[in-house]
Each structure stands twice: as structure tokens, then as C-alpha cells.
Amino acid sequence: MAALISATDAALLGLLTQGGELSGYDLQRQAESSGGFFWAPAKSRIYAVLPQLVERGFATSREVVQTGRPNKQLYRVTKAGRAALQLWLEEPPVFEPERAPMMAEETVGRRNSQLMAICGTVLPVSPATASSASITR
């Protein structure tokens, strides 16, 4: 069965599994600090994808009213989002010469121990990713 999400969706969901509620700005900062060398979406892309994840039931959002600055949205991954992320991790990566989804999958997969505490299960890393990990390390 094909995964229901794109590499960008998966990366954002993976980041959301680690931080409780996060804003688009928080997600961009985390993306830049944890994987910016292989996945660095434009801020506009992050802000476009987050409402789609909410609409598809993979995340929830709530508005935080702020004084003296615009209100912000905080996002949290749902059970459906965790399940979609797990499906994505189980699929063989798709070759995209201008992108590195295998590296994104490996980075998300490396955080299985952190995800286990959140999800209660270990998300498997696909054999293709496991073999590429030995090459990239």
C-alpha cells in the first residue's frame, strides 16, 4: 500500500511527534537545525502544507492570541498522522534527484527511540533505508 503523504508531509509530521504543539516558525527552525542540509523547505511551503495536514486529519491546530503581534497557529500530530508517518517510513524511498527523501526518512527513523516514548511503538526503518544508512554514515 502506498503511503498517503509526501516527504514534506512526513518531515513535518516527524518534527511534530517530538515537540508537542509547534508553530510553523518552530517547525522551520527545527527543520533548519536537524536536516537543513538535505531538506530545507521554504517558509511558504511549510505554511501551505500545515493546513492541509489539518484538513486531512493528520494534525490539529489551535490559534494563540498574542498582544502586539499577529496571532499564531500551534499544530499537534494526531493518531492518524502518526499512522500515515509510519506507513511512509515502511515504504521504499522514491528516487528524486533534486531531493533527498532517503535522508529525511533516515533522520525521522533515527528518532524511533524518541517516538517510542510518544507513540508507544517503534517505527520500523525500511530495508532500503537501513542499507543506505551504512553508506551515508
Image: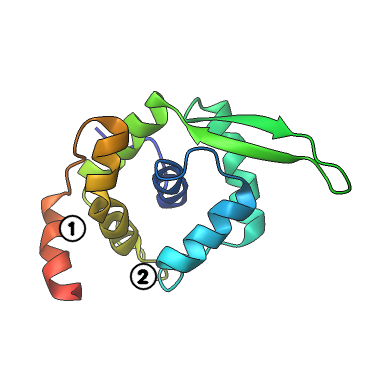
Q: Which mark is residue 129?
A: 1
Report the side of 100 relative to 48 (left or right): left
The residue that mark 2 highlights is 97
Q: Is residue 70 above or below residue 105?
A: above
Identify the residue at image location x=56%, y=44%.
22
Helix, strand or loop at mark 2: loop
What is the x, y in percent for residue 83?
32, 30
Three-letter amino acid code at disc 2? Pro
Helix, strand or loop at mark 1: helix
What is the x, y in percent for residue 92?
21, 50
Q: Quadrant of residue 100?
A: bottom left
Report the side of 112 relative to 26 (left or right): left
Q: Nearer the viewer, residue 70 or 83?
A: 70
Q: Which mark is residue 137?
A: none
Q: Quadrant of the N terminus?
A: top left
Q: Of callouts 1 and 2, which one flags the residue occurring earlier in the amino acid sequence?
A: 2
Q: Is residue 28 above or below residue 79?
A: below
What is the x, y in percent for residue 27?
54, 53
